[in-house]
Amino acid sequence: MTRYTGIIDAYRSRMPLPADAKAISLGEGRTPLIKLDNLVRHEGVEADLYVKFEGTNPTGSFKDRGMTMAVTEAVHRGAKAILCASTGNTSAAAAAYAARAGIKSFVLIPEGKIAMGKLAQAVVHGATIVQVRGNFDDGMRLVKEVSETSPVALVNSVNPYRLQGQKTAAFEIVEALGRAPDYHCLPVGNAGNITAHWLGYSESAGLPTAADSHFAAHSTIGNFATVTTRPHMVGYQAAGSAPFMRGGPVKDPETVATAIRIGNPQSWDLALHVQTESKGWFDECTDAEILACQRLLAEQEGVFCEPASATSLAGALRDLKSGKIPAGSTVVCTLTGNGMKDPDIILKGGFPPMIEVDAVKSAVERVLVDRL
Ligand code: AN7
């Protein structure tokens, strides 16, 4: 048995890091690929349908894969502080990895629009939290400006090391399935993660992609799993926050899925390359569809993801039912974050009220008898 120590150690030869850079890790990666046979039966679709549950990462989202890389590289260069704008998960990961590295973190968040758990994470890890009177896109503009003139490392996904880390989710899927899926579905905000997955699949297939010119693929395959095909990449957005569906930036994005409340995606051009090269598509889901799917997944399979994450599965189920994704396909949906980050959304969501009883055995038995 060797102790698992995270994605940099696991895929070092496939990472563009100096050989002497010491990995700053919390053991991220190796997340479960869960087959949804209950849900497939319940929904009457025919597919090998999986979710890659990124909510089991150390800070509860896929951001840890990118943050271990960005912070490792920044610290190696001598950075003493990192900076990001965030809808919540990036700030949680940045705060945690900065703590681990013993450096400072500064996070810009949109006022009042971040899930409680994510805010608590930034607080507990000692980040300096700046609430911007504006939305994520305002914060993003600000951190890009500030990082040009201040001695801080910008760790949003415009930092290419982020995507290099996030590509490892595709490596893990290829290893687990022994092949690439036919379709890979993700929620899309800045479109960094869909681009990162395409990089990962392309490297596993030994195929070039237009995204390489931007990120300079560094992979040597060595003993790692290889594949002969790549999936169609499908990106789903929240309807009130769907710039890829509108053909340009959305000025005032609004959705219950606060993680993807993003109107001006930073990886716009790259994501369009991914769509073209993979023969994939973008689509949108309503808030009602997103919340219904979050609940369905929790009830049918025991998997609790955050609202933004359910967007990928809600869209995939719809496209399976319509036949746009053909019956019999192997489909992987990324569940980007953990449901426990955003408990408010559930407790506000019209669930049955709790039952209150006197502290006597018979009262509890009565509850059971009525329901067994
Ligand atoms: C759960 O934390 O942008 O398309 O600032 O937290 O790569 O942006 C979060 C994004 C999907 C979208 N699901 O990924 C942030 C942030 C969850 C997320 C996305 C995010 P990208």
Image: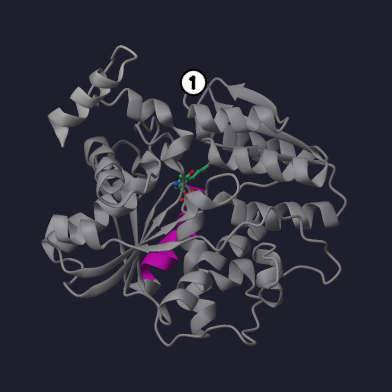
- The residue positioned farthest toward the top in the image shown: 358
Find residue 166 and report its horizontal and vertical position in percent.
Answer: 56, 60
Relative to 180, does residue 126 appear above or below in the rendering? Answer: above
- The residue positioned farthest toward the front in the image shown: 361
Find residue 20 and report its horizontal and vertical position in percent.
Answer: 86, 68
Q: In this rendering, would 76 be left or right of 308? A: right
Image quadrant occupied by the C terminus: top left
Query: Which residue lies at the image location 63% right of the left edge and 43% below the top edge?
Result: 93
Relative to 266, does residue 214 appear above or below in the rendering? Answer: below
Find residue 154 and report its horizontal and vertical position in percent.
Answer: 70, 45
For badge 1, the amino acid type reads Gly
Magenta span contains residue 271: yes
Query: Where is mark 1, residue-wise?
Result: 112
> What kind of element bears circle 1?
loop
Task: Judge the density around disc 1: few (<14), some (14-19), many (≥20) Cα neighbours within 10 Å.
Answer: few
Residue toward you, 266 or 57: 57
Q: From which residue to which does the magenta span run?
A: 265-276
Instruction: Using the rendered image of the protein, determine whether residue 218 is visible from the camera's viewpoint.
Output: yes
The chief SS type of the magenta part is helix
Instruction: Using the rendered image of the protein, determine whether residue 210 is visible from the camera's viewpoint.
Output: no
Residue toward you, 193 or 337: 337
The quadrant holding residue 229 is bottom left
Magenta span contains residue 217: no
Residue toward you, 8 or 256: 8
Query: Which residue lies at the image location 66% right of the left edge and 37% below the top edge?
Result: 143
Find residue 244 and report its horizontal and vertical position in percent.
Answer: 35, 50
Query: Which residue lies at the image location 55% right of the left edge and 63% below the top edge?
Result: 30
The quadrant holding residue 233 is bottom left
Q: In this rendering, would 71 be left or right of 171? A: right
